[in-house]
Amino acid sequence: MPPDLWPQDSFLGALDEPTRNALLRLGRVKTYQPGETVVHQGDAGAVVFLLLTGRVNVSTTVENGSETLLAIRHPGDILGEMAVFGNMPRTATVTVRVPATTLVVSGEVFKRFAGTHPGAAVTLAANIAERLRQANMFRADAAGYEVDQRLARAVLYQVQRFATTIDGHWAADLRQAELAMLIGAKEGTVQKAIAHMKELMISRRGRVVILDVAGLARLADMSPPGHLLGDPSSG
């Protein structure tokens, strides 16, 4: 699998080549189609998954039946490591959004690998710390910003991880229902907010298309991602 498939800020992308190659020899490849479930909330955490290609949604359901989208994972990300290292059931369900390929590695094998490869252990710790930081940011956003700003921030968070292009603009593969769950709002509220922000971004066929990166960043009270200020056609 070519390493340039995995961004530098992903788990696989951050590993040095010898460590990554050694890890990739430890598991078995499994493919999934959209809508398939990789793991179910409450399952035993016996394996970890390395997302080689595709995209998955990580969601949780609380006691009253409400579902929340916790995160979106992209190629190079690791899944299920918390349950393996914590010896606890899965705390979320992972559902395939875009056709995906994973490498399935036994939890015990992965723990031994991390114990004998310090670079992998450090990268894993940094990965977990970044996810905790993101979770804290989303909680702070929910308390400190109105819906329009939360929406703008959520879109910029996602497009920083995995940007696509459409009609000469940067875009994020996000449905309105997904955005609603990410920011803790009703889908109708998100639909209205996007309509109010039509000069900054629009929703089209399951994608959010950013028309004005700098303007969206100003609304979001964020610095605009530098790599998104360039010409999308050259990205």
Image: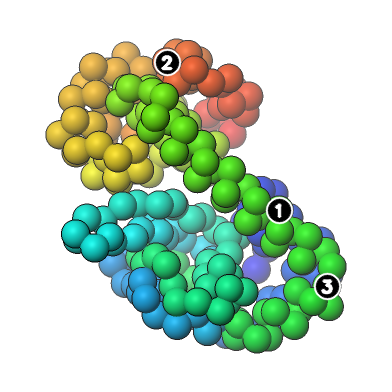
Q: Amino acid at mark 1?
A: Ala
Residue beneath label 1, please? 126
Residue 21, percent across and down? Answer: 76, 73
Q: Are marks 3 and 2 in contact (CB under 8 Å)?
A: no
User: How far apart are labels 3 and 2 at the CA level?
Assistant: 43 Å
User: Residue 83 versus residue 191: which sits nearer the camera?
Assistant: 83
User: Residue 41 versus residue 176: which sits nearer the camera?
Assistant: 41
Q: What's the mark number on residue 232? A: none
Q: What's the mark number on residue 219? A: 2
Q: Earlier in the sequence, mark 1 or mark 3?
A: 3
The answer to whether 31 appears left or right of 62 in the picture is right
Residue at image point 44% right, 51% down: 71
Q: Amino acid at mark 2?
A: Leu
User: Residue 62 versus residue 26: which sits nearer the camera?
Assistant: 62
Does residue 171 appear in the picture of this structure? no
Does residue 218 appear in the picture of this structure? yes
The answer to whether 44 appears left or right of 33 in the picture is right
User: How many numbered marks appear?
Assistant: 3
